[in-house]
Image (cartoon, helix red, strand yellow):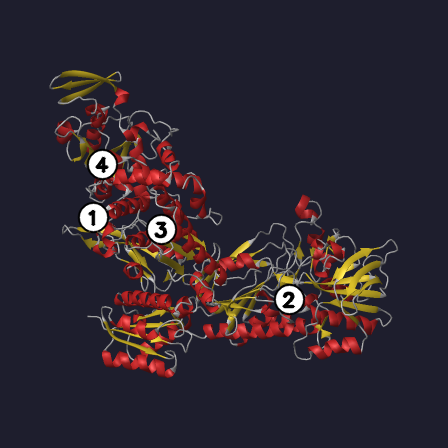
């Protein structure tokens, strides 16, 4: 796959269709690849990578990149195309300035899950027929592929590309996922249990802002939490209230816009399941206002900028489930 | 540095009896920025206002807090007072310590504590108030009247008289409304058609009036002075510009079995029809539910006989869009159908009729040519029973809780007309009360009793039972003599309640005007602004606002016209300065705000910006048209970055109030 | 749960100018009683209420927050309260999801004619919040009153 992508990227650079390419480059270790923009074929040859660890969603980078001169080639996995579409819909990405190649999605690997097996000193990870051969400083270890897949891929909602100019590989389908199971489990707890669960999780927050910075829906020119005029500016959460406040408002601001790409939880250094907050909104929206998938298209109205005269009353919150 | 003045009103004892006003003034004097804090008996009085004005001048105040009655009462009074001495009126805040404090609470300690907190919240807010200047918005010099009954006609004529263009939208094929169906009018007994039809003709001939008959309002956008209205001209399958109203088509139409709604279904009309002889516009209409040509393509007689070539079976609904400065609602009323009242046998006995049906039965243009005959066997009735308050003043689901107001008088009229024309007929009227408050009304009723010997019986009719011999047994109680009566009647007439037209509710939603629980339009103030709705630029004419007789309807119609003319005379109106605005540096250009704006006040443009990193960038940013924005604030919450804020109710102002209350 | 008789909750009520604020005025005009704990903030429309204001109120020491607006279909601005209904339903649902007591938040429709409903709503709401006691789950310790 990587070779096919590199070949196509170089062709498009050569024929002038695009003047830059956004993809991934390897970091210090094999497993910490990051998004990167390549300007030349040489740069691509030297650093371009696409493997089981290249799971970062590059669509957010296109907010800035699509406003630069010339067209940029973006390789988008199915989940990334939803984010891309949503940003096009919000006029944040200039669609004409991006050449989208749809590439197959995951499942991708989560290095933390490999490390959790007690495997350290990792030098390389190879996928041989869905068995990972992990080369370490201390020898080679083996691990079934599916024991190390990323959380966001385990709950994959769709293998379908909702936008592309061309595809490399096959397009997939929207999947039946059980991504709301955990939300439902929490809903069935008592209020005290839910409170304890979230206190336990959110109290780990160190306000590194990684979730916000990676989120393709969080593209505000100036985030309310950085704006002294907003009245809720804060840099580091001083107490439990501010921990709650940050995550509630962040989830509310992306409600109806979040495509459930899972990046927030993936990047959280404290492993807080932040995606559950977004999924709670998605689940509520689906059940109260009709199925809605942000980013599935670029024209439909977001559920929070839309209404029906016969929408349910807010008392539904007081009536359903467990108090 | 802020210099804030606080003024605490006693409102006589209205506030002072439950709130220690001196303690409030004292407590608020210690709030940051407060340089003067006073209390006074009646702050809204001239001397009270002078106190405020002098304090502003002497202390160079930068903000004023009035602790008094609701801002809905006197906010404007104090804003004007402040403006008169050079303080921007939007630097005045009201703390509502009467309606929302002293009148609610009985305990002086807690009421005083609450009043202080409300005062503190107002002080906290006024610290963040900014001077605002109201913009101006032009007024389109054209009015729309919705409904072409006597109310709509009168309003349109008055507005046209003042020299403004006015359009009447009437859902029926002709204007005229209910009054056209009435035979005679009380208390003068003059013929309704004789006084109405000249007005209909006058409206049609007036160069300023355009009548859209067989049309409905389907969409209303905009705001006072600048409404954009879509009117659906329903397909009548006859070219209005060609039809001469000769009526030949109606004579030749083979489909003659269509219930005639103008005669309350008491006789039939043809599928192509002109509702009545004096219809305006006098143009035929084809009823697509009955026309053989439209239903199965076989007939075409009307098209063949029409020498003007006006028949057009292919006509479709047309939509026209027009701008108006003012809108007058004159949608009128309908009598309720009494078929839910099984005891009155209306649904199965043809000789039990409603009062409006009786009007048609007695009308010279009615089904019997003006001779009163029983619908069942076309014989003269010799005993007629009138039942009052059918569905009015009713506390059950079937009827209306209100008094329909006109029934007592028209029943007296009916009774009198019958006794006049057919002296051999006995007339009984069963009533709860007889209500005759109006000029010459009681005299009229007494004439019915004393001169015409109509039998008025206080009591309700319990059961109406048609008998095999064609007579009707009316079982009733006489409350004054306390006895049960059985009257062997030939006809029973039900004075049914009146209700607002069914089109009123969806129209109110389009106009964003308020209605009461009975679907009557709510006036802006029940006493002082009876012909205006609470929505600026929308006026109320006639029975759409509440039950009314003809003179009252006409009076209100003219009053609504006067209010509309007052608006149309202005070249521009002052806008509400409490509108949204966008901080372009923070705007993402995401269009969330645009999508929730009910007025389309938000547009986007690409602008060049110097970015913090010293580059220039072209960014899509929102801008608000202050003349169009009405200041609801929906956009401020839709905006994730907080770029959108609202003058007068800014994020920081509301949070300052929250903080002051929660402290 | 034990009810503390002496507990006086702080209640913030956001009322839309056209219906609910007028309804509150009417309950005053009709001298209908409700507890002094309720303090009203006037907003042009219920759709002006930002979730941030609600959280801010809890942060600063409110024990209950209620939003009142025109009945659906009667909004002075046509559609404002429809947006409110979706936003606030979702927000309250989220607070519930985080384990915040659901009876601390409410959204009610009160028209300008419903003075009695306004008073009843406030009486009921204050009673419910009193049962819950002091807001501890969503408070800011720095703002706690001694």
Q: Position of residue B455 (x, y in %)?
A: 80, 71
Residue A238 numbered mark, or none: 1
Regarding mark 4 in the picture, which secondary structure is present there? Answer: loop
* Mark 2 Cα-neighbour bin, 10 Å: few <14, some 14–19, many ≥20: some
Q: Nearer the viewer, residue A255 or C121?
A: C121
Vertical placement of residue A56 versus B243, above or below:
above
Question: Mark 2 — residue?
Answer: B403
- The answer to the question of whether label 2 and label 4 lie on touching residues, with beta carbons closer than 8 A, is no
Q: Residue lying farthest right? A: B469
Are discs 1 and 2 less than 8 Å apart at CB? Answer: no
Badge nearest the viewer, 1 or 4: 1
- Gap in angstroms between the C-alphas marked 3 and 2: 49 Å
Residue in the picture at 31% in, 31% down: A78
- Residue B393 is left or right of residue A235, and the answer is right
The chain letter under disc 1 is A
Which numbered disc, 3 or 2, marks the residue closer to the eye? 3
Q: Where is residue B575? Give x, y as percent.
A: 37, 68
Q: Residues within 10 Å of mark 4 (few under 14, many from 20)?
A: many
Q: Are marks 3 and 2 in contact (CB under 8 Å)?
A: no
The quadrant in which residue C62 appears is bottom left
**Which type of secondary structure does the marked residue at label 1 adopt?**
loop
Q: Position of residue A3 (x, y in %)?
A: 21, 23
Give the Cα separation between the discs numbered 1 and 2.
64 Å
Which residue has dot 3 on it?
C133
Labels 3 and 2 positioned on one and the same chain: no
Q: Position of residue A161 (x, y in %)?
A: 33, 32
């Amino acid at each position: 796959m990587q070779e096919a992508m590199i070949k196509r990227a170089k062709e498009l650079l050569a024929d002038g269709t695009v003047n830059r390419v956004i993809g991934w480059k390897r970091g210090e270790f094999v497993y910490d690849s990051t998004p990167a923009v390549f300007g030349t074929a040489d740069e691509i040859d030297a650093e371009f990578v696409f493997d089981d660890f290249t799971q970062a969603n590059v669509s957010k980078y296109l907010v800035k990149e699509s406003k630069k001169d010339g067209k940029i080639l973006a390789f988008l996995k199915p989940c990334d195309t939803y984010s891309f579409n949503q940003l096009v819909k919000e006029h944040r990405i200039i669609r004409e300035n991006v050449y989208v190649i749809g590439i197959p999605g995951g499942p991708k690997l989560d290095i933390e899950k490999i490390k959790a097996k007690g495997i350290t000193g990792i030098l390389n990870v190879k996928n041989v027929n869905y068995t990972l051969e992990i080369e370490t400083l201390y020898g080679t270890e083996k691990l079934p592929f599916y024991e190390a897949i990323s959380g966001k891929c385990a709950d994959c909602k769709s293998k379908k590309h909702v936008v592309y100019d061309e595809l490399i590989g096959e397009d997939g389908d929207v999947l039946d996922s059980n991504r709301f199971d955990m939300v439902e489990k929490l809903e069935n707890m008592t209020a005290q249990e839910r409170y304890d669960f979230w206190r336990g999780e959110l109290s780990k927050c160190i306000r590194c802002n990684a979730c916000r910075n990676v989120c393709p829906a969080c593209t505000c020119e100036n985030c309310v939490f950085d704006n002294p005029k907003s009245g809720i500016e804060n840099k580091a959460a001083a107490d439990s209230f501010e921990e709650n406040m940050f995550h509630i408002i962040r989830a509310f601001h992306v409600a109806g816009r979040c495509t459930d790409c899972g990046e927030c939880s993936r990047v959280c250094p404290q492993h807080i399941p932040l995606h559950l907050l977004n999924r709670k909104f998605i689940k509520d929206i689906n059940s109260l206002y009709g199925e809605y998938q942000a980013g599935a298209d670029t024209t439909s109205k977001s559920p929070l900028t839309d209404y029906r005269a016969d929408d349910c009353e807010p008392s539904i919150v007081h009536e359903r489930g467990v108090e | 540095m802020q210099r804030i003045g606080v003024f605490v009103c006693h409102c006589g004892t209205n506030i002072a009896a439950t709130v220690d006003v001196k303690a409030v003034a004292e407590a608020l004097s210690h709030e940051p920025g407060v340089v003067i804090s006073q209390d006074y008996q009646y702050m809204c009085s001239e001397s009270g206002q002078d106190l405020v004005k002098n304090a502003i001048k002497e202390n160079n105040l930068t903000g004023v807090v009035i602790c008094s009655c609701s801002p809905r009462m006197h906010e404007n009074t104090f804003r004007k007072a402040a403006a008169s001495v050079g303080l921007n009126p939007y630097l005045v805040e009201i703390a509502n310590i009467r309606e929302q404090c002293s009148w609610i609470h009985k305990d002086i300690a807690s009421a005083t504590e609450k009043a202080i907190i409300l005062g503190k919240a107002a002080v906290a807010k006024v610290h963040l108030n900014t001077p605002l200047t109201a913009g101006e918005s032009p007024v389109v010099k054209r009015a729309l009247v919705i409904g072409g009954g006597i109310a709509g006609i009168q309003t349109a004529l008055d507005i046209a008289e003042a020299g403004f263009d006015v359009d009447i939208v009437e859902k029926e094929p002709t204007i005229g409304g209910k009054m056209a169906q009435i035979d005679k009018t009380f208390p003068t007994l003059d013929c309704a058609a004789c006084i109405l039809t000249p007005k209909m003709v006058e409206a049609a001939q007036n160069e300023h009036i355009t009548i859209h008959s067989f049309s409905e309002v389907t969409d209303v956008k905009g705001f006072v002075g600048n409404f954009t209205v879509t009117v659906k001209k329903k397909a009548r399958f006859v070219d209005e510009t060609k039809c001469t109203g000769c009526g030949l088509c109606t004579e030749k139409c083979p489909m003659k079995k269509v219930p005639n709604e103008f005669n309350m279904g008491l006789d039939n009309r043809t599928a192509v029809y002109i509702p009545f002889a004096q219809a305006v516009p006098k143009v035929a209409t084809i009823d697509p539910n009955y026309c053989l040509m439209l239903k199965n393509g076989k007939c075409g007689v009307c098209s063949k006989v029409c020498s003007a070539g006006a028949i057009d079976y292919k006509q479709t609904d047309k939509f026209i869009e027009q701008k108006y400065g003012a809108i007058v609602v004159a949608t009128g009323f309908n009598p309720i159908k009494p078929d839910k009242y099984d005891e009155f046998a209306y649904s199965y006995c043809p000789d039990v009729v409603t009062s409006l049906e009786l009007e048609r039965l007695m009308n010279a243009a009615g089904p019997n040519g003006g001779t009163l005959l029983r619908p069942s066997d076309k014989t003269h009735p010799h005993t007629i029973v009138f039942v009052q308050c059918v569905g009015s003043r009713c506390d059950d689901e079937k009827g209306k809780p209100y008094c329909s107001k006109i029934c007592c008088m028209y029943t007296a009229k009916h009774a009198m007309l019958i006794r006049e024309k057919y002296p051999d007929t006995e007339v009984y009227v069963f009533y709860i009360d007889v209500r005759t408050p109006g000029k010459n009304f009681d005299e009229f009723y007494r004439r019915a009793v004393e001169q015409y010997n109509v039998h008025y019986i206080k009591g309700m009719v319990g059961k109406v039972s048609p008998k095999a011999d064609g007579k009707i047994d009316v079982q009733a109680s006489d409350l004054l003599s306390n006895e049960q009566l059985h009257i062997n009647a030939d006809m029973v007439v039900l004075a049914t309640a009146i209700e607002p037209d069914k089109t009123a509710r969806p129209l109110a939603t389009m106009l964003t005007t308020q209605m009461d629980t009975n679907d009557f339009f709510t006036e802006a103030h029940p006493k002082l602004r009876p012909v205006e709705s609470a929505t600026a630029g929308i006026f109320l004419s006639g029975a759409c606002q509440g039950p009314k007789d003809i003179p009252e309807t006409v009076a209100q119609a003219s009053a609504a016209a006067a209010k509309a003319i007052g608006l149309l005379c202005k070249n521009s109106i002052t806008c509400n300065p409490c509108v949204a605005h966008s901080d372009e540096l923070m705007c993402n250009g995401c269009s969330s705000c645009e999508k929730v704006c009910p007025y389309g006040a938000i547009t986007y443009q690409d602008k060049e910006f110097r970015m913090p990193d010293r580059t220039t960038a072209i960014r899509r940013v929102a801008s608000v048209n202050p003349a169009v924005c009405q200041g609801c604030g929906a956009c401020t919450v839709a905006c994730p970055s907080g770029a959108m804020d609202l003058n007068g109710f800014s994020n920081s102002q509301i949070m300052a109030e929250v903080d002051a209350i929660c402290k | 749960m034990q009810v503390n008789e002496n507990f006086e909750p702080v209640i913030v009520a956001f009322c839309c100018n056209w219906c609910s604020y007028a309804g509150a005025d009417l309950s005053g005009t009709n001298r209908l009683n409700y507890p002094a704990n309720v303090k009203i903030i006037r907003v042009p429309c219920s759709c002006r209420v930002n979730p941030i204001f609600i959280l801010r109120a809890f942060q600063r020491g409110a024990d209950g927050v209620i939003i009142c607006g025109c009945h659906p279909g009667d909004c002075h601005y046509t559609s404002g309260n429809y947006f409110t209904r979706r936003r606030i339903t979702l927000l309250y649902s989220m607070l519930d999801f985080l384990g915040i007591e659901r009876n601390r938040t409410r959204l009610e429709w009160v028209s300008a004619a419903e003075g009695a409903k306004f008073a009843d709503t406030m009486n009921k709401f204050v009673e419910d919040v009193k049962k819950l006691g002091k807001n501890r789950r969503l408070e800011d310790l720095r703002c706690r009153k001694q």
